[in-house]
Image (tube, rainbow, N blue to C red):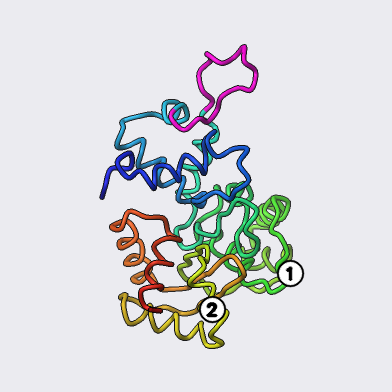
Amino acid sequence: MQRLTSNIDLYSKLLLSVGQQGRGIKQHQPLQPLECGRYIKQLMDEENEDRTQVSERLGLGRSKDSSHMYKKRDSTQVTKFLQLLNISEKSQDLAGWGWEGHPKIPFSVILKMINFSHDEQDKILQTFKSNDKKEKLTQADVQNIKKCLDSDSNLAIDDCIEKIMKLKVVDITNLVVCEIQDTLKNFIKSNDDYEKRIIDMLKNNLSGEFYSVDTTDVLITISMDQNAFTVFHEQQLEKGVSYSDFLNSFLEEKIG
């Protein structure tokens, strides 16, 4: 795997997504929060830097008060990105910035689940993802589910999700959620059977089982088994590109 600071395109996208370089510019972050967490961890490992040092490198944690400009950097923002790596890998790709719309969930809300088990996280997040009403999952929802669980030891997470979210818990799979770029967007608009065709492209070229494809104007969500999920990420890391760039490039080759 290429060193992150040597991968100029990817390193620039990290800076644009989290650092001062990306603020004040009317554009969406090129990387998703989970990717930022993974690349920050990679950067820390490769450069042997702690959270304060990497905060300095990425332009994070600087006080707006100029009189405090020489104070030690606050590493809270870096810590939040890294905490996303502790969310269940089956569902952590649902973490978003807030502008993407359903099924993405602001990662500040997802971090409220950090003390839930992975099974509980998956059931909350993937049940919400399958909600046709497209209502927002809020921090209050998460807090109320926690209160429900704490109030009665006989209640299971399924009971509390149904009570608070008014939804039946769905079957859990591995999810990949990416932005749709122009070529793939045009393919989706031009083909009524795009879901089947995309599934076939994936099954014919990657190991594992692919279950479903869901799209919005902005996002594509692919449900798959653990084997396919592992292969997907291995190939994405090998290419040294973002999730969205990898998936779009992969499918564009097959679309022709």
What residue span does the magenta drawing correspond to? 57-74
Q: Is residue 153 above or below residue 27?
A: below
Q: Element type at marker 2? A: helix
**Which residue is label 1 attached to?**
166
- Marker disc for residue 115: none
**Which residue is label 2 attached to?**
188
Q: Residue 167: x percent and y percent?
A: 69, 71
| Camera-side residue of 138 and 62 | 62
The CA span between labels 2 and 1 is 32 Å
Task: Please tell me how crowded label 1 is: few (under 14), some (14-19), or many (20+) other residues with Cα within 10 Å.
Answer: few
| Camera-side residue of 229 and 17 | 17
Q: Element type at marker 1? A: loop
Three-letter code for the amino acid on which mark 1 is drawn: Lys
The answer to whether residue 51 is magenta is no
What secondary structure characterizes most of the magenta part?
loop
* Quadrant position of residue 253: bottom left
* Quadrant position of residue 235: bottom left
Q: Residue 88: x percent and y percent?
A: 47, 57
**In the rendered view of the protein, which quadrant contains the C terminus?**
bottom left
71 left or right of 43 in image: right
